[in-house]
Image (spheres, rainbow, N blue to C red):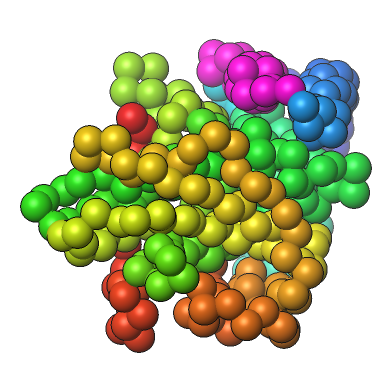
Amino acid sequence: MFELSNYFFIIMNLASGLLSLLGAVGIFISLIIQRRVSQLQDILEELLDLSYDEGTNNTVKIQNLIYKYQMQYMLPVKPIKTVISYINLNIALEVLFWIWLLYLTYRSPFQWDSLIYLWPMAAILAVMIFYRQLIKSTINPVDNHMFNSIIPSPRYLRSIAFLSSYVNVSVGTIIRQARPTPALRKKGPASWHVILKEELPFDDYHYYFCLTDQEQVYFSAFGHILIELDADPITGKPRPTARNLNIPLGEITQDQPFFKPEASLLIFPKGEKHPMEFSYDLEQASNVYYALGSPRVSVNHLITYNFEEKNTLNILSTEAKEKKLEALPAKINSGGSRWYCVDGERELVEAEIKPYID
């Protein structure tokens, strides 16, 4: 019915037509993604602009921007599945056409050296599979980290390490918007929980915390703050942000009330060489010690640091002779681990309670 040579050309035209359609889909998706990336960049720039507004409480604005970013970041599930299914079907048909052509052109006997003729098809198949992964990562970046540098996940908008990588951002103001505030909550007759409260869950930064009373150190802690928010229990969608987060720093045993407790929090953002220091005066109210008013914020120029491999904080030098900084370690690892010691003891205890929402 058909001449074999003409039939070859028919199959080849079908295969090339499918490849052309696959390329057209890629162009269509690239136009959509280009507009989407532009919108995400606009939201990110708006967030960075807020970092210079020091005198205003922009907590609600920042939270709304993060939610708006997630709305643009996540595409509807059904169109994503349709596009991926189309690409899968296209690749499958291409492979079937190639196998059929090989079957029609095959002549016995089989020789191993003839396999060298298959390498162009294997190479094109590998490129098509990579192309599929490229499209999938572009239209569905959730759990696909190929384009994180171009389309960062919404959770990165609350990462101090990520935000501090931008030149045009005031990290100090961003941290102030989180409203980090220490508190002591009574756990037992002589036991207290030491908690760092944040109005917005900014994380991915190294810290050092110290509680003193009349220059005596009662509690010190250090580590790396990393907050993983659970997905929405109903929709299953990831939650990029939250409000009123509590970060347990450790426990302290104290049966007598403090006279005039003070707390110091040092934060070591990336892109800087001197830490930010937040100083608080604490006051007791029933079973809670809370911070009075706004903290005193300054840059501690007596401490110099940098970051090594694996995001490890390295204290280069410290000229401070204060007793509260004696427990500051030379290195602080990342990974979300939090450690503390009590009453000047050298034995470290890990704070195992995860951050939680009030």
Picture quarter containing residue 290? Answer: top left
Was residue 154 drawn as part of the magenta stretch in this picture? no
Where's residue 280, x and y in %? 53, 49
Where's residue 101, x and y in %? 71, 43
Residue occupying the point 46% across, 70% down: 215
Picture quarter containing residue 350? Answer: bottom left
On screen, residue 231 versus residue 151, left or right, reads left
Residue occupying the point 26% across, 60% down: 251
Residue 153 shows up from this direction: no
Q: Is residue 48 above or below residue 111?
A: above
Residue 275 vs residue 356, the one in the foreground: 275
Residue 284 vs residue 61, the one in the foreground: 284
On screen, residue 236 versus residue 142, left or right, reads left
Query: In the rendered image, which quarter contains the N terminus?
Result: top right
- Segment colored magenta: 56-80
Residue 197 shows up from this direction: yes
Residue 344 vs residue 10, the one in the foreground: 344
Q: Is residue 265 above or below residue 104?
A: below
Q: Is residue 192 above or below residue 253?
A: above
Was residue 67 drawn as part of the magenta stretch in this picture? yes
Where's residue 11, x and y in %? 77, 31
